[in-house]
Image: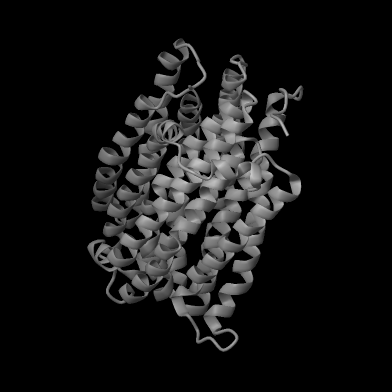
Amino acid sequence: MHAAAPSPRPLWKTFLVFLGPLVLTNMLQALSGTLNNIYVGQMLGIGALAAVAAFFPLLMFFVAFVIGLGSGASVLAGQAWGANDIERVRAIAGTVICAGALLGAAIGVLGFFLAGPLLRLLGTPPDVLPDAIAYARVMMAFLPLLFVSVLTASVLRGVSDTVTPLLSLLVSSAVILLLTPALIRGWTGLPPLGVTSGAWATVVATALSLGWIASHLLRRRHPLAPDRSFGPHWRIEPALLRPVVRLGIPTGLFFITGSLADLALVSIVNSHGSRATAAWGAVSQVMAYVQFPAMSISITASVLAAQAIGGGRLEQVDSVTRVGLGMNVALTGGLAVLAALLAPHIVGLFITDPQVVLLAARLLHIAVWGAVLLGLGSVFSGVMRASGTVLVPTTITLSLLAFVLYPLGWTFNRLFGLQGIWMAHPATYLIGLTLQACYFYGVWKKKPLRRLG
């Protein structure tokens, strides 16, 4: 199989063909966590949901770097795929998957033993701390599988295969849907696993989905199938890992800094009590659905721009940018409106306490608009990343997350209470969009585009 020639279809159709499965994949990924939280909240109560919510920002902190590696791998693989260099694509895949497995093992061991001190440092409410620690330790042990899963999907997207990750998540979601309630109740002689049920179900589901991907690629005789021809590439090549890391560090730092900012904000939320923590967790789950389409559009724009640059079709880069911005307004904006209109019903899936439902709905009405602004800014940074330009877009994003988001959250909390914390997100993303657009049009577009070596 070789990289396809440029499609004669209009770019917006190519964009949608790539984007559709990617959006569904990311939404299904969010659904896995959502299903766990619905089961936990409905079957075990608000305290158990608060325990899971207290750990979520910590999990995002640990997985941030591998998300960055995946971003870098998709750009490098996309350029190689656009240039029809299949062996280079295989070498990139083998390098990042091996590196991800080793990184996941190292972080998982450290996280397992440090889960308690870290959750205490965050001010996790004492009544949910034991459950939060138990949940965190299972998820930490699971990190190598999670890292490999994220990186496998990223490389496949780099070669324009967004369907295989989607199908694998259908397998994973089905397993979680069936296994989580069974583990909560107790299954085949096992005692009920309580709040850790969702974590164990996720471990099993991810392992099965990775096995399915391997067999699926082998059946299709895909260039990235783990067969004999791929065997020599199961190693880390420093010459390939370096550009992947260089491209991926900005995205990883974005998630790390964002997670640190969220961890700081969660410490303020925790001061309002476990009900506020539960409301925060419910809103965070809903926001994943609103934000994932925005981030999916950014990934699509980055990959298609990288393929255009790798294939020498530089005139397509401007078109990719325009289509990405339009998709964000239409898709992310439409989803934000829908989430705002249905807020009480949506958060009611996670929470049974009527007062907490009303609180979470008010928070969601504020939060959803930030997703649109985040998505627009991410298109600009994603397209620039496809050409290897990472320093200035990253500096803009990290500066805002490090020096603007938390101070705004703290200030708005003092002025408006709990809902003020959520006001900080749209305000920060608006500033970021303005700065990214200014750099994109004022500086980046005047630079020549070249394929990465």
Q: Position of residue 317 (x, y in %)?
A: 57, 20
The N terminus appears in which quarter of the rendering?
A: top right
Residue sitting nearer the eye, 223 or 426: 223
Q: Position of residue 262 (x, y in %)?
A: 34, 51
Whether 102 is drawn above or below 276: the answer is above
Instruction: Name the residue: 62% across, 27% down.
Output: 85
Task: Say left or right for 122 vs 229.
Answer: left
Question: Residue 311 sits in which quadrant?
Answer: top right
User: How many discs appear?
Assistant: 0
Task: Say left or right for 13 vs 285.
Answer: right
Residue sitting nearer the eye, 81 or 326: 81
Residue sitting nearer the eye, 282 or 52: 52
Residue sitting nearer the eye, 13 or 178: 178
Res. 230 visible in picture: yes
Instruction: Name the residue: 45% across, 48% down.
Output: 100
Res. 350 visible in picture: no
Instruction: Name the residue: 42% across, 36% down.
Output: 248
Question: Residue 54 sits in which quadrant?
Answer: bottom left
Whether 207 is drawn above or below 386: the answer is below
Q: Position of residue 301 (x, y in %)?
A: 57, 30
Instruction: Name the residue: 58% across, 23% down.
Output: 322
Residue situated furthest bottom in the rendering? 189
Q: Position of residue 423 (x, y in %)?
A: 36, 46
